[in-house]
Amino acid sequence: MLSKPAKRDLKHNRTIKGKGYKREDGLWDIEVFLIDSKTYSFENMHRGYISSGEPLHDMAVRLTLNDERKIIDIEAVINASPYNICPQAVENCQKLKGEHLIAGFNRKVIKTMGGEKGCRHITDLLAYAGTIAYQTLWKEKTGGEAKTITEEEAKSIEKKFANSCFAFKKDGEVYNQYKEILIGKLENS
């Protein structure tokens, strides 16, 4: 996808993987994983020798949500980190129980776990979890096609998405398609 790069030497790998599941009990699990590794071996003050390819960071987050995207349960784990105390940084995640993954969620995460209250990598994973949750529940909530969105979903375009990205710029093509659907639904009701 990208243009051909200049000659270079790979030093760092980061893999972030996210998955969304519908559970048999009707709830949803959103999982996000992060692994960082170096292409060289080095000494670390807290862990000792870290071999090339060995995870410097290995962490995961699981959110259990209901249909309204309310966090019913949350689990965060740090299996590998550069400092021995890092696994303790996930304790404040529990304060997010009861929150909803809606507009403003990332601000709540930063307020709850930002800076010295948590781990930057875990807060990043929680931001990914929010978008994965939206993508996971989207088809279930809308039928997957713009022509089948509910009136409530169409109204949320203005409130949640207007000017949130290039595709949803006000008076742009995509934004206006949703607006036309909403107008059509309102005229037919």
Image (cartoon, grey):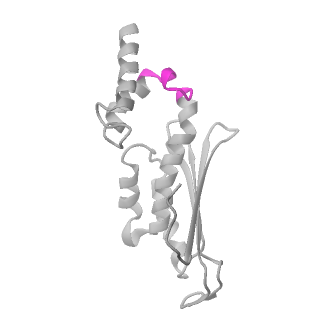
Between 138 and 102, the residue placed more toward the observer is: 138
Q: Residue at x 35, y 60 (%)?
A: 111
Quarter of the image holding residue 115?
bottom left
View extreme (left): residue: 171
Residue 86, x across and y down, in percent: 52, 76
Quarter holding the C terminus? top left
Q: Is residue 67 left or right of residue 180?
A: right
- Image: 85 above or below 157: below
Whether residue 130 is visible here, answered yes or no, is yes
Left or right, residue 85 beside residue 153? right
User: What percent of the width, then of the height, locates residue 22?
Assistant: 65, 40
Indicate left or right for 73 with 165 as reference: right
Residue that appears at 53% across and 44% down = 133
- x, y percent for residue 179: 35, 24
* Viewer-closest of 157 and 40: 40
The residue at 67%/38% (across/down) is 25
The image quadrant of residue 50 is bottom right
Observer-nearest of 159 and 8: 8
Over which residues does the magenta segment extend? 142-151
- 55 on left or right of 122: right
On the image, the x and y values in percent for residue 185 come to 40, 14
Residue 175 is a magenta residue: no
Classify 173 as above or below 88: above
Indicate the quadrant where residue 87 lies.
bottom right
Residue 28 vs residue 166, the one in the foreground: 166
Residue at the spot 48% in from the left edge and 48% down from the top edge: 130
